[in-house]
């Protein structure tokens, strides 16, 4: 499993935010569209039925330095477990033909996400909606590299930049 920007990529699937939580909640990306799964069921939207998809309430990492981030993530995760809190909630706002839809997405990064990765992830999500990018590219990367874990920040940003670049 690897986290690249707001995307959690496994050898089998690509998610916005975290993979399925303990209670089963997740938002999965497919070639056809988005699938939101929660304990009460699932909802799906095809890319062609979406006008926009924007993630809000994304926690931004504010701690500098790799060791500080690691310690901050561990403390944050430990505090969450102690206080009975789960992962931080984000909101995925979808503009559909039928009107706006709100979907809860859980943050996979306990310490928050780097600002540049958030921007690039939003650009990529917009390209999926516009059908000028294909989420299967992330899935292919996951099958090849997913078991290696999350790459370093510079590599994550380079991947997101490559994935958001218009095909020529």
Image (spheres, rainbow, N blue to C red):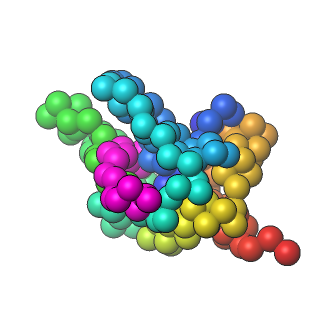
Q: Nearer the viewer, residue 100 or 9?
A: 100
Instruction: State left or right for residue 8 relative to residue 64.
Output: right
The vertical placement of 121 against 10, above or below, is below
The vertical placement of 18 against 41, above or below, is below
The C terminus lies in quadrant: bottom right
Task: Tell me where residue 2 sits by quadrant.
Answer: top right
Instruction: State left or right for residue 168 relative to residue 55.
Output: right
Q: Would residue 152 be visible to someone looking at this image?
A: yes
Q: Nearer the viewer, residue 152 or 68?
A: 152
Instruction: State left or right for residue 155 relative to residue 62.
Output: right
The residue depicted at 37 percent of the width and 27 percent of the height is: 41
Q: Which residues are the magenta region?
A: 94-109
Residue 22 position within the rendered picture, expressed as x and y whole percent measured from the top left: 36, 24
The residue depicted at 49 percent of the width and 65 percent of the height is: 51
Residue 50 position within the rendered picture, expressed as x and y whole percent measured from the top left: 50, 58
Residue 98 position within the rendered picture, expressed as x and y whole percent measured from the top left: 38, 55
Inspect the magenta stretch and tell me whether residue 30 lies in it: no
Q: Nearer the viewer, residue 152 or 131?
A: 131
Instruction: State left or right for residue 119 relative to residue 14.
Output: left
Inspect the magenta stretch and tell me whether residue 106 lies in it: yes
The residue depicted at 44 percent of the width and 70 percent of the height is: 115
The N terminus lies in quadrant: top right
Task: Tell me where residue 164 sits by quadrant.
Answer: bottom right
Look at the magenta stretch and give its main secondary structure: strand
């Amino acid at each position: 499993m690897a986290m690249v920007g707001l995307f959690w990529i496994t050898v089998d699937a690509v998610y916005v935010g975290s993979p399925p939580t303990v209670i089963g909640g997740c938002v999965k990306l497919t070639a056809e569209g988005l699938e939101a799964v929660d304990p009460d069921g699932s909802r799906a939207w095809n890319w062609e039925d979406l006008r926009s998809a924007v993630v809000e309430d994304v926690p931004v990492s504010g701690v500098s330095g790799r060791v500080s981030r690691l310690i901050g993530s561990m403390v944050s995760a430990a505090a969450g477990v102690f206080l009975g809190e789960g992962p931080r909630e984000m909101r995925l706002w979808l503009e559909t033909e039928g009107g706006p839809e709100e979907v809860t997405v859980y943050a996979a990064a306990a310490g928050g996400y780097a600002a540049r990765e958030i921007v690039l992830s939003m650009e990529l999500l917009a390209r999926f909606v516009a059908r000028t990018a294909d989420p299967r590219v992330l899935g292919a990367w996951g099958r090849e590299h997913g078991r290696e874990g999350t790459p370093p920040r510079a590599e994550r940003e380079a991947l997101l930049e490559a994935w958001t670049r218009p095909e020529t």
